[in-house]
Each structure stands twice: as C-alpha cells, then as structure tokens.
Image (cartoon, coloured by chain):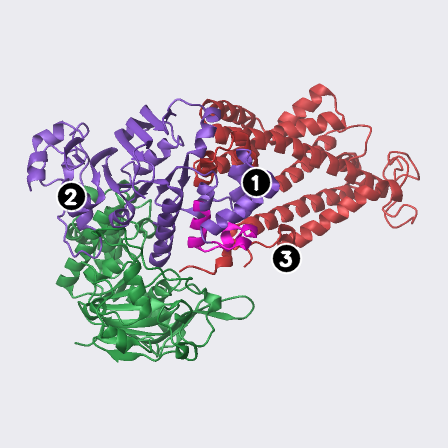
Chain colours: A green, B purple, C red
Amino acid sequence: MDPVLDVDGLFVSFPGHGRTLLPAVEDLGFAVRPGETLAIVGESGCGKSATALALLGLLPRHAVASARRLRIAGTDLAEADPQACREIWRRHRGGRIAMIFQEPLTSLNPVLTIGEQVAEAVRAHEAVSWRAARGRAFDLLRRVRIPQAEQRLDAYPHQLSGGMRQRVVIAMALACRPAVLVADEPTTALDVTVQARVLDLIAEIQEETRTALVLITHDLGVVADRADRVLVMYAGRAVESRAASALFAAPAHPYTRALLAARPRPGWTGARPRLPEIPGRVPGLGERGAAGCPFAPRCAAVLPACRIGRPDLIVLDGGTAACLRAGEFAAQETPRAAFG
Amino acid sequence: MPPLAEPILEVRDLAVHFATPHGTLRAVDGVSLSLRRGETLGLVGESGCGKSTLGRAILRLVEPTAGSIRLAGTDVTGLGRAALRPLRRIAQMVFQDPFASLDPRWTIGRLLAEPLVIHGIGDRAGRAARVRDLLDRVGLPADAAARYPHELSGGQRQRVGIARALALDPRLIVLDEAVSALDVSVQAQVLNLLDDLQASLGLAYLFISHDLAVVDHVADRIAVMLGGRLVETGPRARITARPLHPYTQDLLDAVPGRRARLRDDGEGEAVPGGCPFAHRCPQASARCRAEVPMLRPVGGEVSLACHHVALAAAA
Amino acid sequence: MSGPADAFARAPLLLSVLHRPAGAAGLAVLALVGLAALSAGLLSPGDPLDMVALPFLWPGTDWAHPLGTDMLGRDLAAGLLHGARVSLLVGIVAAVIALGIGVGAGALAGFYRGRLDAVLMRATELFQTIPPFLFALAIVAVLQPSLTTITLAIGVTAWPSLARIVRAEVLALRDGEMVQAAVAIGASDARILLLHVLPNVLGPVLVSASILVATAILTESSLAFLGLGDPNVVSWGGMVGAGREVLRTDWYVAALPGLAIVAVVLGLNLLGDALNDALDPRRMRR
C-alpha cells in the first residue's frame, strides 16, 4: 500500500543572532502507510516538535522550512509555491491531516461547550446543519468513550478531567476522518493510568479507520507498546529509523541503545543497578555546525572516523541507522533486553 | 547503606484539609508513615492524590489539620516559624521545577549560600568554600556559582536544587517529582547522583513521584497513595513483584513498555465515606462504597487498605 | 520545541529601553525637563514671580525675554524653567509616597492574605470609590494649598491601583515554589518578601511608577489651574490657569506651559510603554 504521508529531505531552521539560521531539523525523511503507527522519539531539543509543526504547516512565521518531498494523502506540498501551500494546508488540516497537542486545555476554547466545539470541528469540513453536527458530536464523544456523553455535550472544558479533555481533543481531530493523525506528546500531561487508556483508545480507533498515526514522544516505553516503526531523532537528524520489533530487539545506533538503557525498569533484584548515563547534553541549536556525527562527543562507542564526516545511513534489518558501527550493533542483543 | 533502626521521620495520622468553595478538600486524610536513616521511601500516586501536599506538610510548608510529625524525635507539628528554623537543618526539600524554585535574579552562588546565611553558618570565605564544595558534590563546575539559573540546562538546574537542599547537611530530603521534568538521559544522571549522595551522606529520602518505574528504581520501600490515603505499603521488591491492591496493579500495568491493556474504568466520582478506589475497582462491593478500608498489615511487611484483603492476598 | 537557552537573557534595562524608539524619545524629553529644572537658578536667577518687563510681550520680540511675558510682565521662560522644578518635585515625591503606600499595602495583603488582606483591600476599594482628583482637591482645600499639602494629597490618593497590581503579583508568587523553597531553608517572612518577592514584582511597579509621576504632574497642574496651587511658587498648571483669561488675545501665555505639561506627560508615558515592553519576557530582546 502506498504511504499516506511521505516526507523526504525536510529541513527546518530558526533565525539566530544576526542573520544566521539555526538548523532544528536536517534532512529528515520518513513515510507512514494507512493504519500504521510511526513513533518519532527523542529528547527535548531533538527537533521532533518542529517536525510535527512542519507537517501541519503550523511552524511560526519566522521559521524557515523546506522539503524535497512532503506528500500528504496524494498531494505533494514540496512542489507547490508557498501561497498554494498555505491554501492546501488550510484545506488539509482537520480534513486530511489533524494534530493532537500535549496540553488539551490549550486546544480547547474555555468559553464554548464541548458539544459546540466538536460540532464546529464537524462543520468546518462538512456542510451539515448544526443539529446534524451536534448529533455527530454525540457519536464522536461516545466513540472516544466519554461516559455520559449526552451531558458532557453541554459541559465546559474546565469541568472535565485531563484525560477526558484529551479524549475531546481526539474526538475533534477525528471529526473529519483524517488520513494522518499527528499526536505530539498526547499523553505526557496525563497520569500514567489515564495515559495508557488514552493510547489504547487511539490504537483502537486507528484499527477501525486505518488512520496513519505519527506519535511524537520522549518515552521509549510508550513507543515499545504502540509503534510499528520508530524514528529516533538526535540534534535535528534521524539517527535510526526501523521497524519497532527490529529496533527493540537490537538497537543499532549507540544513542538508541543509551536511551533504552537509561530508563529505570521495574523488577530489579540484588544491589540497586546503576543507570547507564549519557554524558554531556544535547547540543543547542547554535552548537551544531561541527563536522562528524552529532552524537560523537557523547558516544561510548566513538571511533576516530566518527569525528570526520557525517555517517551515512546504513541499511539494516528493518530500516536504517546513521552510524558507522550500526551493522555491528544490530547483530548484537540489546545490553538490557527490551521493554516488557 | 543498610537502613539503620533510628527513625528520622515519623508521621502519625496526618491530615491536611483545605476549605474550598465546594466544601472541604481532604488532600491528606489520616496518613502514617516512618522513615529510617539512610532509607528511601517511594511515595507514588496519581496527580491530586495528595502526595505533594503530604511532602509539604512534613516540612510544614502547608499546615497540617490533624496528626503529628516527628523529625529526629522532635514533634514539629505545633512549632512556630522561629522554633522550626533549627529543624530545617534536619529536613530539606527538592522541588519538581528548579526554574520555579530558584529566584531568577540571584546567582547560583548566592542561592547556595542563602541557607548558610540564614542559619549563621560560617563567614564569607567559609561560605564561599562551602558553595564550591556543594557544586562539586552535585557535579557542577565551580564557575557555575557566578551564573544565573536561566544560563543552566534543566539537568544542571536540578543539580542546583539538590545542592541547595544539601547546604544545611540535612538527614532527610523530600524529593517532590524531582526528576519528572527531566529527559531520560538527564534523569538517569540525577538518579545516580541521588544514589551516590545517599551512600556517602547517609541521607533518607522521601521520593515522591507519579512514575512507578522510577520509584521502583530508587526506593527501599514503597507507599501507594490514592485519594489522600495510603492504600498499600511495603518493601519495594514485594510491591512491584506482587501488587495486592487493585490500584497498585493498575499503576504497574500502566508503566509504559509493559504492553498491558488496562480495563476501561470510565470516570466516576469517588464516593465520600468509601474506599477511594471503589468507583474504579472491578471488585468493588457495597461495603467498599460505604466504609473506608483501614491500612492493615497483611504479612511480609506489607500493609494494605482493601476490604478484599483475603481475596487479594490469596490471588 | 525548546528555544535557544538565552531566551530569558535580558540586556541591561536602561539599554533595552534606549533601544526602543518610544523609550529613547521618552528619556530624551525627561532629560531635557530635568536639565531645565536643574539649571533654572542658573539661567534665570531671581524670583520668577517678579515683574521684569512690560506685560504681554510676545515670544521672540525681546531677546532678553525669549518666550515673552505674561499679563503682569513676568518672564515666561523663567516661569517654565522654575515650573519644571515644581512639577518634577511634586510628581516624583507624590509618586514615591504613592509607591510606598501602594507597594506596602499590596505586598502585605498579597503575602499574608486572610484578614489583613481583607482589611487592606477594603481600604483600597474605599479609596477607589472616590475619584482621586476630587479627593486631592478636597484635601488641599481643607489643609490650605502649599507644596507640601499638595504633594501629600496627590500621594495619598494615587496609590490604590498600584496596591492592586502589587497584590496580584505577590499573590501569584506567594504560592509558587520559589517562596516554598525559601520557607524550607528557614528564611524569615521579611527576607522572603524583601529579597525574593519584591524584586520579582519590580517590573510592573516600575511601569506604574512612570505613569504615577505623569498623573501626579497632571493633578498638580489641574489643582494649580483651579487656583489651588501653592501661591508662593510658580507652576505650569498655575501659569495655564493665569493665561486662561487672555486666551483669545494672547494665547501663548497659556499654550507654552500647556505644551510643557503635554511634553513631560507624553515623555513619561512613552517611557512607561518602553519599560513595559522591555520587562515583558515574551518580547525580551534575544
């Protein structure tokens, strides 16, 4: 099946001091098929949120973005001129591609009822009466399993819990049956038990509607549970892009390996294990010009060659990784067997 | 370091109630716990369960409504601000967001020296030396003293928060979601740092977090809190290997990376006067809605607040 | 998206204000007025209330009196220079009084909340129900107009809005982790309030202060215009009031001091705007 979202050579930069441009995303490419879940993982500053905003055409005005290919549901925005792009995005957003943000309160209007907002989302893309839209809103709220949906139609956002609010946002995103759903840390602000249930709900709806999901998260645990494919980002670049099963069985990039190892896992015995640290920190936007692999200064497996040129993408079992030693690592078992 | 017998903290039947426009909010409702020197108690629960309020009440940052708090044998429950000051040297706190807890207009050096100034410790040179020592202990370079909080990364700021808590040489530190806002790799660094500090200084930690995986990593014992009450307490390995309370089971199943699917629990309101989990519990009976279960020992150093103890313990 | 780490970095306040056109213009006007006030004794020694020439000398007709004279033959230039002293003095001292009361009441109310807050805020509301100008007018009328009573009257009527601003800011900080962290290390209330809380509400206070000075100058002028100024000193408002009667024939007598009032008030407002922008973290210079 053809990918419904196909991105190649995506660059995003933000203006720095003077006339410099600071690269936030460099040469990123990925594709998602209907019904598939792609997780984009990385720590703060890796460029994952800038990527999400770029997909929706929601980058701030001062940002500079370009792509070789940005095909959403059959339309390639990279070929359109900026004016046409804005128009396509305006029509696409909510229709072909929709986004769920981290904090549901910021995407909901505090002075409108839940019913009004969901109905408005329906009417934004379909010429139906208010009455019919309200009916659809009720169906959608039931669909995202909001209990007592009838009453909740007339509730205001502040009267709902965080988990319920996020369900409303999902209902709004689903209102127009988007082909691609981009979820930027959709459950980070929620309690763990609520988080699990909201993710279950998204997965279930996805199964029914064959929506392609781009799940942006910092949490590799969430990825292990939910993703079909994983794109690990570091300092604005893809360092590893593979099928989830292959990645978790034998991560090929040292950064992926370090991230997996750094997360505490329940159920240790004996003396408290020391968590493997990644020394140093993610380079800031202005510190990224250096030749060589961006992870080299923090990498435990660094070779002299790593500091000379950017490592090419190496094709491996289930995908690619940008590391000279990727083949070697991909053949090894994980230092600490994957999650689960 | 093996936990020593001497309790550094003893909390008895602590309650913190707030008056709200909708009636009394029982943020903490009859909690008892104790903590020995060099031990870590992990306090885990969802947002709004009262874990943060409990941590703050222990340091008397919020006023307890009832119950008692003993720090190193001294009852601090009724003490005034001035009488409390010497006891600040026993118990300290690290906050979730160091950006909010560190005055943005002060340099790191001045922030770290402030506790020493307040408690009249050392002269100017002595305090400067102590600041250098504190920075070194938490793995920050000495020149960080001249910087402002906004000039540091999130992980470095949290190290400053920890250094400030260490300044008075406390024996107990309450860590309120101290690593929750940090990236995974930075979180690992800070958790390791906390481990090292505990080993070298014999600190006791009350580690408050919503994240059972992190709590399981740091804690010797775990207390699970829900609706202002403790519902299960016990040795760490026992709690995460064999959770008895249905809520603890939910928390464990919800840890990302476990591929567990949770029951849909809808979203009702907790029944006043009943078990705080009754409205979400698959096993809830009429008794659960009518009577609050008390925390009782069920063997193996585990205590449980559930009317279905026998059932749960046998399962 | 995490922005660059220096998003919070701030340039020194004065520089940041000067970088804004409004700030530079405001400061320039105020510097000029300040200079006039300082050099009044030097440029025009003697009492500006003395009659020194023929009355109704138009500006530019006699270079000994470049801005002309009024109906009593008093030198207008000398009046403007000495009037600047009075305006600035009254404006600044009254603003300081208002700042003292407003910041004090607002900070205590916000920090201690409860009963003290209720009492202080009721008092604030009481003051706010009376238009400040009428209130000041009444005080001056009862106490006899003099520089001291005028300044006091303006000062004690201008603080309520400031108290509310400070209270709101302090309330927001009061429950924050910064204050909790300070309590946890054993800091006293005075220490927390003076060293941590108040410095962090300085921004809005500075902005209000510049507006307060402008308002005080306007109030003083209005009082003087109505004849409730200090009769022993020259003031811009008083000059406008005196010129009122000859407005049709010799309008410059009222217009020149009026222009001075407009300039200084505009300067202060521009400065306030620039301060507001400079202190707003969202618009902070990168």
Q: Position of residue A254 (x, y in %)?
A: 32, 69
Q: What element carries label 1?
A: helix
Q: Are marks 3 and 2 in contact (CB under 8 Å)?
A: no
Residue count near mark 1 (Cα–Cα under 10 Å), binned few <14, some 14–19, many ≥20: few
**Mark 1 falls within which chain?**
C
**Mark 2 falls within which chain?**
B
**Residue B266 visible at all:** no
* Residue A180, picture quadrant: bottom left
The answer to whether residue B238 is left or right of residue C67 is left
The residue identified by callout 1 is C199
The residue identified by callout 2 is B243
What's drawn in magenta, residue-wise?
Answer: B140-162
Q: Is the magenta stretch mostly helix, strand or loop?
A: helix
Q: Which of B264 and B98 is in front in this view?
A: B98
Q: Position of residue A236 (x, y in %)?
A: 38, 69
The residue identified by callout 3 is C19
In this view, the mark in front (1 or 3): 1
